[in-house]
Image (tube, helix red, strand yellow):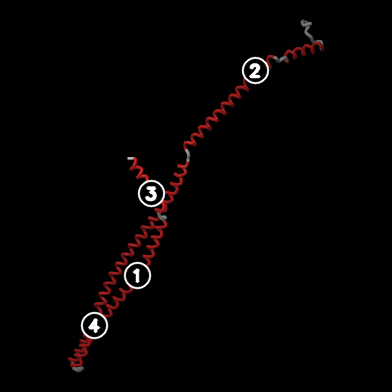
């Protein structure tokens, strides 16, 4: 089981390495969009050219059809003139025959132009379909690119934050904080001990000073001396 886990980890590492070595997906997507826009420009140019050919073929079709009808009408007029003796019957037959030959040639050219027109129309329809597909793909790719750029920003920010978090030595930090707390506690206890010692020493000195205080007795003696000098001494005292 451990062997499979190890092989899986190796495969993961190789896959991540291959992804890291790939070209920037954003640049690849942007280049793909540029290529598709070039294809779109070429398709639009080809569409314009094929449409021009289709229009030309349709115009030729109409022109040859008009010529065929014109030669048909001329043949009829000539035959009528031959029939009405306005011209020699043999000459009328010859010219009418030539007109019908020209009509047939015009009909053949009209058929060919019609076939070309239909072919060009199919080409136009196919090109228009391709252009719509390319436009849709460009739109989809541009939306994908926007999403990809946003995802890359989030991914980079997340990766940076996770990297910072991964590089933090949480155990060392907690240990350092505990040592600091212990040191502060020791300093506080030491300060309190010094305070107690200082207060104890002060109390003893106060007691000693109070016991050795002779200022009140001296004041009483000075008072009696002053009264005596002033002749104010109490008779009972004398």
Local packing at callout 2 (Cα closer than 10 Å; few below 14, some 14-19, many 20+) is: few
**Image quadrant containing the C terminus:** top right
Left-right relation of 41 to 103: right
Local packing at callout 1 (Cα closer than 10 Å; few below 14, some 14-19, many 20+) is: some
Residue marked by disc 4 = 105
Q: Residue at x 37, y 46 (%)?
A: 10
Q: Quadrant of residue 210?
A: top right
Left-right relation of 147 to 182: left
Pick whichever, 164 or 107, lies toward us. Answer: 164
Gap in angstroms between the C-alphas marked 4 and 3: 74 Å
Residue marked by disc 1 = 46
Q: Earlier in the sequence, mark 1 or mark 2?
A: 1
- Nearer the observer, disc 1 or disc 3? 3
**Residue 32 x, y percent position in the rendering:** 38, 60
**Residue 61 x, y percent position in the rendering:** 27, 77
- Nearer the observer, disc 4 or disc 3? 3
**Image quadrant containing the N terminus:** top left
Q: Residue at x 77, y 11 (%)?
A: 224
Q: Earlier in the sequence, mark 2 or mark 3?
A: 3
Gap in angstroms between the C-alphas marked 4 and 2: 144 Å
Residue marked by disc 2 = 204
Above or below, 56 relative to 29: below
Gap in angstroms between the C-alphas marked 1 and 4: 32 Å
Left-right relation of 212 to 178: right
Residue marked by disc 3 = 14
User: Pointer 4 and pointer 2: residues touching (CB < 8 Å)?
Assistant: no
Pick whichever, 4 or 93, lies toward us. Answer: 4
Q: Residue at x 22, y 90 (%)?
A: 95
Label 1: element kind? helix
User: Pointer 1 and pointer 3: residues touching (CB < 8 Å)?
Assistant: no
- Nearer the observer, disc 2 or disc 3? 3
Label 2: element kind? helix
């Amino acid at each position: 089981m451990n062997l499979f886990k190890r092989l899986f980890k190796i495969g993961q590492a190789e896959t991540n390495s291959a992804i890291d070595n790939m070209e920037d997906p954003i640049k690849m997507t942007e280049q793909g969009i540029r290529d598709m826009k070039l294809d779109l420009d070429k398709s639009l140019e080809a569409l314009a050219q094929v449409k021009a050919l289709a229009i030309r073929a349709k115009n030729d079709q109409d022109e040859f059809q008009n010529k065929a009808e014109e030669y048909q009408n001329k043949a009829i007029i000539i035959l009528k003139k031959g029939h009405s003796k306005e011209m020699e019957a043999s000459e009328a037959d010859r010219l009418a025959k030539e007109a019908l030959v020209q009509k047939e040639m015009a009909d053949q050219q009209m058929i060919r132009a019609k076939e070309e027109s239909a072919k060009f129309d199919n080409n136009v329809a196919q090109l228009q379909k391709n252009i719509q597909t390319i436009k849709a793909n460009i739109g989809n790719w541009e939306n994908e690119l926007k999403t990809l750029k946003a995802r890359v920003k989030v991914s980079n920010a997340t990766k940076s934050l996770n990297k910072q978090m991964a590089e933090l030595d949480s155990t060392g930090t907690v240990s350092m904080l505990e040592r600091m707390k212990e040191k502060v506690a020791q300093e506080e206890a030491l300060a309190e001990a010094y305070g107690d010692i200082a207060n104890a020493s002060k109390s003893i000195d106060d007691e000693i000073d109070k016991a050795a205080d002779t200022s009140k007795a001296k004041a009483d003696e000075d008072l009696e001396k002053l009264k005596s000098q002033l002749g104010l001494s109490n008779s009972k005292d004398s």
